[in-house]
Image: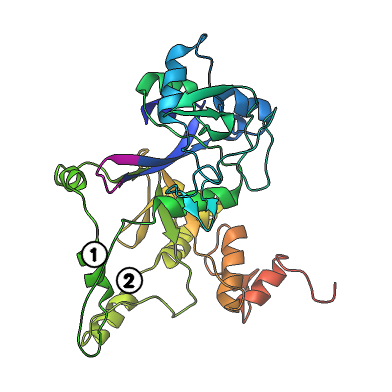
Amino acid sequence: MDDLTVHGVLEKSIAHVYTIEFQKRGWPHAHILIVLRAEDKFSTSEHIDKFVCAEIPSSIENPRLHEIVTKCLMHSPSGIENPGAPCMETGQCKKMFPREFRTETTMNVSGYPLYRRCPGVTAFVRGREMDNRFVVPYIPCLLLKYNAHINFEVCTSLRAVKSIYKYIYEGADYANMVLTAGQVQYNDIANYIDARYVSAPEAMWRLLGSHMHERSHAVMRLLLHLPNQKRVTFKDGHEEDALEAARSRQTMLESWFQLNQSDPDALTLLYTDIPYNYVYDRNNWKRRKREGNKIVARMYVVNAKDAERFYLRILSLHVPDATCFKTIDNAIYDTFKQAAFHRHLLNSDEE
């Protein structure tokens, strides 16, 4: 991870997230997502070719890299050549191998580039002659250093990045089979605990306290709620106690209103900017005394059908120094939609 996030193998990394996953045979591997700063992001074919390769290296010019690639980075034959391969699904390889030959790298609408794979270069791998169509993309310097399978893919679209995040947090493998007589009562929590497939190496990994996942930034989710509609959680039989506690406790949003009344420095900041300068502690925003953990602040998405909260979100994204969103120039409006309209954040239906 230090090579990717500290030592600048891919230039400047500004964020990362990874998870450790165990195969059924027991060995661990990591799924890693690296976010680069804007000027270092892969935007051209030439930039991609500078770091990433999907071709068999020369056995004469770079014999060690040739050996590693042919040993660790060649996809097994599939398709017509090997219809019984594990990667085959409904008659096609799930990983889309063999790929097409290409004389140059091109950007793709899917967010994953189509890497250069020139014809004419072959190597014998596990008794078969294979070419560049079967090479898994890699970074040469990392292969030479670690002599291991390190697949590297460039993700250039939000859709591709979202799929990576889903894959990272998909959870463990599981298997469950129960023979019962009569009506079945499902217990999702018990099924999850009882059905997880945990190999011996994974058990040891967890017992030793090794990290299963890590991310460079903590994500702070900013709550939005309408007046007198705080979120309240309670146990059966303790509803009144929970309501009383909620009345006396300020939410993030209410604390922001309070902060703008007492701290002039906060008046220039939007709701989404507050966490970078203040810490939410004991139901109050307090100024950060020093740089702590890296954070990313985000606000909950609100469906437009939830009209009042939707317009409240628009206001909070554009209005600093708020102490109450419905008050503008000493005038109080009945709805957040009216307040947003009079702040010129909405177009008139007549336009």
Label 2: how many Cα within 10 Å (few below 14, some 14–19, many 20+): some
Give the secondary structure at mark 1. Answer: helix
Give the secondary structure at mark 2. Answer: loop
In magenta, the rendered stretch is 22-29
Q: Nearer the viewer, residue 81 or 64?
A: 81
Q: Is residue 46 left or right of residue 313?
A: right
Q: Nearer the viewer, residue 88 or 246?
A: 88
Checking the image for residue 249, the label placed there is 2
Checking the image for residue 263, the label placed there is none
Residue denoted by label 1: 195
Magenta span contains residue 247: no
Point out residue 208 in the picture as x, y percentages from the top left corner: 15, 42
Q: Nearer the viewer, residue 246 or 113?
A: 113
Please tell me whether mark 2 or mark 1 is closer to you in this view.
1
Quadrant of the image for the N terminus? top left
User: Can residue 89 be seen?
Assistant: yes
Q: Which mark is first along the chain, 1 or 2? A: 1
Please give the name of the residue rendered at 46% of the width and 48% of the height, measured from the top-left corner.
Answer: 87
Point out residue 282 in the picture as x, y percentages from the top left corner: 29, 60
